[in-house]
Each structure stands twice: as C-alpha cells, then as structure tokens.
Image (spheres, grey):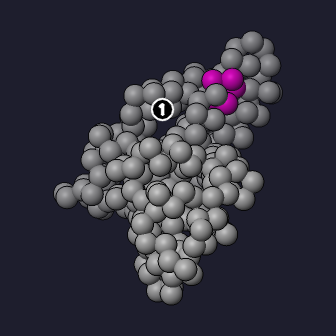
Amino acid sequence: MTRAADPWRDTDVVDERAARFAQGTTGAVALLGVVFGWPLAWALMSAQLLVGVTLGRPSCLAYYVLVQPRFGEGPLEDSRPPRLANMIGTAFLGLAAALWWLGAEPAGSALGALVAFLALLSASTGFCVGCEIYRLTARLRGISPRHHDRIDLADLDGVRSAGAYVEFTHPLCADCREWELRLTAESEPLLKLDVRERPELARKYGIAVVPTVFRVSADGAVLKRLAP
C-alpha cells in the first residue's frame, strides 16, 4: 500500500482514522475496567498511552498493521491535538487505577467511566474533547489580535495593496489542502508558509497547529483569523 505519510517517521501528522481507532480502544478498555472492576485495565492502558506519547504510536500499532493496509490511508491531520488527548487519558486512567487501589473505588470508577465516555464519543463521532482543548489553547497563544497582531512583510512574499490570505501549512495535512482549495477561489492571493520548511516562522508566530489561516492587510496587520 502506498502511504502519503510513514506512520513511524512522519509523527507530526496522524491518520485521523488511527486516532479514532486508538480512542475506541481506550474507551473499550476503560469501560471494561468500570464494568468488571479491573483497575489493572486502566493502569495498563495508561502505560500504553504514555509509551505512545513519548516514543511514537504503539497505541495505533494494530491500526497501521491490520486495518490501514486493508482500507487505505485516511485524511491526515496535525498529530498534536490527539497527542494532548492521549496525555489527558494517560493521567486520568493512571489516577483512576491509583484511587481504586487506595480504597477510593467510587472515585476511581467515576474517572474510568469519564475516560470511557469521552474516548468512545471521539471514536464514534469524531468530537475529541482533548483535541478541542488543544486547539483552544493554541488559538490563545498563537496569532490573534491580542498576541501577534502583525506579520513582518519580510516574512511574506506577494502581499499587494488589497492584502492576502496567509496559511501556515504542512505538505501532508489534508485540512490544509481543503483550505487551499477554498481560498484559491478568493480575489486576494494565498500565501503558504510550510512549517516543515520554515520552522523558524512557526516558532516566531507561535503556530501550534496546522492549518493556521488568517487574512492580513497590505501592511501585514492581522485582520481576521480563519483557522483553527
């Protein structure tokens, strides 16, 4: 099977189906722990998520080995939002197991049930609470009228009197391509800044998620943020 992104090396993006598959696995294991009173299930899943967050994608191993070769690669997205969701799941499941073993079984079960609900919600609908938390905090600390309210014209090439749309993008990002198709139909030019080729600009402007899209005036002032 031909992949746009290598699952073991291109860790800055993730197949969105892999993220949902991992959430479904996490939710199912957490639910089993609640139903049968198995705190060990929470502890083992917490450990697996921790390894995945720090070393790569072991939580998605079954997907990349068994599922993706059969059904193909899904849309690729920034891996940082689901990574934060996994970090939250790691902490909550570890705490659930600890509370159970310390004698606070109702509290442990409540935390396990919360993780199960949120993970299965994400797997079934695509709405990931941890991912939304990441995007919200990224928006607060990234380019906005109250933060970086201007882009240096020296960093841009092609801004004319009417201004332009500027997109921080990644060559493997599916959402980035959707924004590019949408904005190429506009009258103002679209300027793309590849965060892989220009990491110094991503750091300079606090770009924490791609795509980040905004409209600037001819003098580089940020007029409006469109995404995330």
In the rendered image, residue 22, in percent from the top left (x then y), is placed at: 48, 44
Would you say residue 16 sits in the magenta stretch?
no
Residues 57 and 141: in front is: 141
On the image, which quarter does residue 226 sit in? bottom right
Residues 195 and 164: in front is: 164
Q: Identify the residue position indicated by label 1 in the image.
A: 53
Would you say residue 94 sits in the magenta stretch?
yes
- Could you tell me if residue 95 is visible in this image? yes
Quadrant (top left, top right, bottom left, bottom right) of the N terminus: bottom left
Tag count: 1
In the rendered image, residue 120, in percent from the top left (x then y), is placed at: 60, 50
Density class for disc 1 (Cα within 10 Å; few <14, some 14-19, many ≥20) is many
Q: Where does the magenta region start and end? A: 92-96
Residue drawn at 49 percent across, 48 percent down: 202
Residue drawn at 80 percent across, 19 percent down: 104
Quadrant (top left, top right, bottom left, bottom right) of the C terminus: bottom right
Q: Secondary structure at mark 1?
A: helix
- Could you tell me if residue 38 is visible in this image? no
215 versus 142 height, above or below: below
In the rendered image, residue 122, in percent from the top left (x then y), is placed at: 59, 54
Residue drawn at 70 percent across, 14 percent down: 101
In the rendered image, residue 225, in percent from the top left (x then y), is placed at: 64, 66
Residue drawn at 59 percent across, 30 percent down: 90
